[in-house]
Amino acid sequence: MKTLPLLLCTAALFSLAAAATQPPAVAAEFGDGGVSDLYRWDAGIPAEPGIVLKRETPPPEQRIAGASSAERMLYSSTDGLDGKTPIVVSGVVYLPKGEPPAGGWPILGWAHGTVGVADVCAPSWTGPSEERAAYLNAWLGEGYAVVASDYQGLGTPGPHPYLLYRPEGYSILDGLRAALRAYPGRLANRVILAGQSQGSGAALGAALLAPDYAPDVRVLGTIATGLVVDTAAPGKAPQVPVPPYADPDYVDAAFAMLYLLGTGTSLHPQLDADDYMSDAGRPLLDTVRSGCFRDAMRVAKAGDLSAAKMYRKSVAAIEDDAARAQSFPRAHIATPVFTATGLADAMAGTAQQYNFISAMCTAGTTVEWHYYPGETHHSTVNLSLKDSLPFARRLLAGEPVAGNCARLRPPGPLQKPRDKKKIAD
């Protein structure tokens, strides 16, 4: 695939040069580095978000079967922490096979799950897992182009604000803007957002922010599976108690380290994660700086680590700040939402998912919720295609989505999984 002509890049940059911002310096303590030159931008950053800066083709082994082509891109966006500073973000675009229909292919704006906080974990750099490739292939086979952001700080310099909906939402929306500019006539401004786990909050965050931040992006609806999202304003929505967390496969320690190194250092730039580490926790910190989520779980298991063993002083204040920044200010989403919850989801928990769905319903969001008995955090994603693809078809056809909030019920006790699969993103 041809790269974006240098002349086009130069013209766009010159037109915005007066408001360009210099990029941040690379800092290895945040997990920066280890990726190609595509992910660095040493010139001024355009003030206008959604400008394509660079493009490159991934290696052949990262191709997915349903795509006719794949292309990484670096684009301008807005720092979701301060809401104003221009930054660069990376992502990848997959085009379906065949010729686009009149007006272009509709877009699936894919929001990935937890992969880590180091640059080398960026999905555009690693390529999707086999399980996620199967999910994306299903959408490509339906005639959707897939636009997938890495999110702020993943692949690109600086810390990754892990689980914070505004940085993730801005990154997704600006990636869609960039793709629409990069493929004129081939992509239609008709977008279905979809996300799993961390990506559920990212996709819902993009839907929440779109009317004000990116009204030019036509979001038709959102698909959220394995919900990891919260709101500070549940209103009068029915809520159920959240049971104590049952840590599967040492993910608690791994998640906690991502939260400290990614989210904590994003919110507190002077924070030095090393200051908080016990001797037992230091190997995990080093791993998260250079490796990905699976590596972190392996090290946590080898060291028999719990989050409590990792620290030599309290991180409670940092975690409280992160939780506040993570929580949605409201639960009303302007466009329809499809949710999928596996009733054996020990990782995200089912009560938490119900509580956010309940808050959305009470706030007036049109929600089509689905429970899947015996399915886990990861098995639910692909299984839910049987229901989410028809949901998306109705949206594209302009048909009304009635929702089923009136039938929403608490999920009950956590079920045993039908098939305990190992963790995927």
Image (cartoon, rainbow, N blue to C red):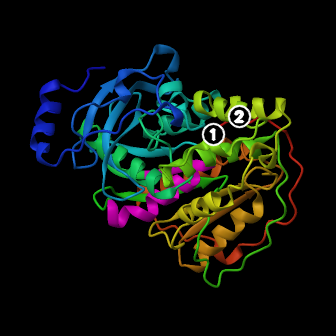
Residue 238 % position (x, y): 71, 80
Q: Left or right: where does residue 395 sit relative to residue 200? A: left
> Is 57 placed above or below 343 here?
above
Q: Quadrant of residue 409?
A: bottom right
Residue 32 % position (x, y): 48, 31
Res 276 visible: yes
Q: Quadrant of residue 321?
A: bottom right
Q: Left or right: where does residue 81 sit relative to residue 246? A: left
How many residues crowd around disc 1 within 10 Å: few (fewer than 14), some, or many (20 or more)?
some
Position of the C terminus by quadrant: top right
Q: Left or right: where does residue 115 sit relative to residue 399? A: right
> Is 127 placed above or below 328 here?
above
Which element carries disc 1, helix, strand or loop? helix
Question: Which of the numbered marks, if any, corresponds to residue 418?
Answer: none
Return the residue at label 1: 274
Query: How many labels, in total?
Result: 2
Q: Main secondary structure of the magenta part?
A: helix
Indicate yes or no whether the magenta region holds residue 309.
Answer: no
Position of the N terminus by quadrant: top left
Indicate yes or no whether the magenta region holds residue 206.
Answer: yes
Q: What is the three-letter code of the residue carrying label 2? A: Arg
Q: Nearer the viewer, residue 243 or 265?
A: 265
Which element carries disc 2, helix, strand or loop? helix
Magenta residues, start to end: 192-213
Q: Are marks 1 and 2 in contact (CB under 8 Å)?
A: yes
- Residue at image location 47% in from the left, 39% down from the top: 150
- Spatial distance from mark 1 to mark 2, Cα to Cα? 7 Å
Return the residue at label 2: 282
How many residues crowd around disc 2 within 10 Å: few (fewer than 14), some, or many (20 or more)?
some
Q: What is the three-letter code of the residue carrying label 1? A: Asp
